[in-house]
Amino acid sequence: MKKLHTILAACTIGLALAGCDDFLDYEPTAVIDQDKAYSNPEGMVTAAYAMLGDCWFSYPFNLFPYGDIASDDCLKGGGGSQDTGYEALELWSTLTPSKPGEMDELWYRLYCAISRCNRAIIALGQNGEEALGTETTRQRMAEVRFLRAHFYYKLVTVFRKVPWIDETVEREGTQEQVRNDALDYRQLFQKVIDDFKCAYDVLPDKGPGEDGRANKAAAAAYLAKCYLTLAWGNGYEDSTGVEFVNRDYMDSVVVYTDAVTKAGYGYLEDFGDIFLPEHKNSKESVFAVQCSDKADDHTNFGRANWSIMLNGCWGIWTDGWDFHKPSQDLVDAFKTRDGLPMFDDYADSMDYPVNGRPTAQKWDPRLFHTVGMPTFPYKYESAYTLTVDNSRTPTMYGYYTSMKEVPQRSKGETYDGEWQAFATNDYVFRYTDVMLMRAEALIELGRLAEARCIVNDIRQRAKNSVAKHIGYAADQCDISLYPESYFADKESARRCLRWERRLEMAMENGRFFDLRRWGVASETLGRFFDRAQHFSYDGKAYGQYYSGAHFTPGKNEFFPVPYNQMYYIPGLYTQNKNYN
């Protein structure tokens, strides 16, 4: 009889076996009869939802290595160049189909998630109406198609050439016959859009903080993101950018972001609150992967966010491994003059604030919510003030630490054993992200005044985000709203929007994908690589390993299809452009 294998605690098992040479004669304990599983469609839907957070630092579904480490916002961090394979994502010149090996893990685990979704769709089709009734079945089907599209969006975003394996392929067992070039980039995106459109047409209009399920606003946000991505071109720099803008797709971005604005979401009043666990399902959260503390759900460890388990600060957390380190270039981008960004000369010098020692150089307040810096409280708590000793490998990665994804240290640890983990949700979409997408589309449609209004609303929130959490930095902050002259034409408006997106969404796992969407990755990263080799803090140099970095347009816009996938069935898959 065919068996359905449900993988439980795969992360823990993988960790326990890592580095071992012994083979285990293991009889799976989590095996159930396939027909019995399909007779419980609600359980199959729950199993599909469970995959949202079923990730690990080596296959993080939030894609932080691919969106941040690969960008100018972030250095890898950790214990050195061999600590994970992610240095290849920083340098690009050493990126190959087999390096880093973590790419293969990500590919495999995302397809495990898709398989769960496909099986849930089959179960709903076979037994949904009898077990759940017509209307609930219809809604659950829409939810699972949302989930499937969510995972496919990540696969296409990272790897571009991926096989489309749906419930028909799952039912027929023909997964190993589906080529990864059967559908081109736009056709794959259309499949993803079709799933999100199904969800959008069926799912209810629920407001923020309801129950963690997908809803119409979440589907609308994803549809906007899909159309925005396609609106700029095909991702490769020779066919991506302002000369390739598709106005119809930009119109769709406005339509779907409008649906989010009408669904009860909004800007949380203080920027700092967005990234504290007690506000994790606020009106700012359009869709997020739900995590929990052991005290919340009365389990041993809670539903931890294992994707960011390496990103705690060294010496602050019991096992903070100091990955995901903000770059000096990101810190300098927060500089202001007369309250406005220093677009043209922000990189002329390497500066940083010192607590209690204000200078003529002022900063956007969001810096103090985003980047942990020596002399400043870690996540607003003076009892945990950072020093230069809170960096694990400073001669490589410098002295800054990422703060958004971690809770306050005084609140304790979700998992406090050999590894570190946190209970912070992973935002898939927060309201400000959606509004920045809307502003981006409005600029390309020539509706510059509307875009300026959105951007200034976001800046006003930043201006209001000083007294509650970062009063100690009040005399170092200065931020103003953009005057009309800054949005007088599309070119200047684009510069403001792109800068705003960098500051607002910094260290939230998407910077490289923004650069790729706009067709400016090679130019931006080239400047960053030149500068990063000369980074220093208080006279202490770091970042010299960037001397070997190089981004190749026409190749590096997408990551290679992993070696193990290419040769699992030789000849089935083709490689992305210019990778050997």
Image (spheres, grey):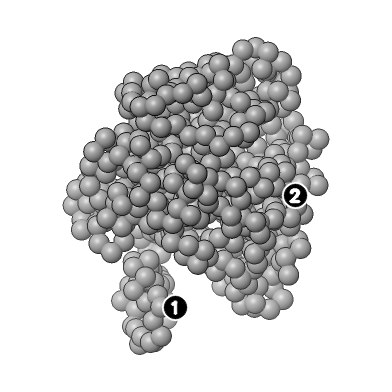
- Three-letter residue code for mark 1: Lys
Residue at 22 percent of width and 51 percent of height:
294
Vertical order, 483 against 70 (above or below) = above
Q: Residue at x 61, y 31 (%)?
A: 346
Q: Secondary structure at mark 2?
A: loop
Residue assigned mark 1: 2
Vertical arrangement, residue 152 with respect to residue 513, above or below: below
Residue 139: percent from left, percent from top: 44, 44
Q: Nearer the viewer, residue 63 or 193?
A: 63
| Residue 212 can be seen, yes or no | no
Residue underneath mark 2: 236
Quadrant of res 205: top left
Q: Which residue corresponds to the image point at 59% horizontal and 16% vertical from the top-left?
A: 482
The single residue placed furthest to the top in the displayed view is 484
Q: Nearer the viewer, residue 358 or 475?
A: 358
The alpha-carbon separation of the residues under discs 1 and 2 comes to 43 Å
The C terminus: image quadrant: bottom right
The mark that comes first in sequence, 1 or 2, is: 1
Q: In the rendered view, tell whether residue 573 sits above or below residue 301.
A: below
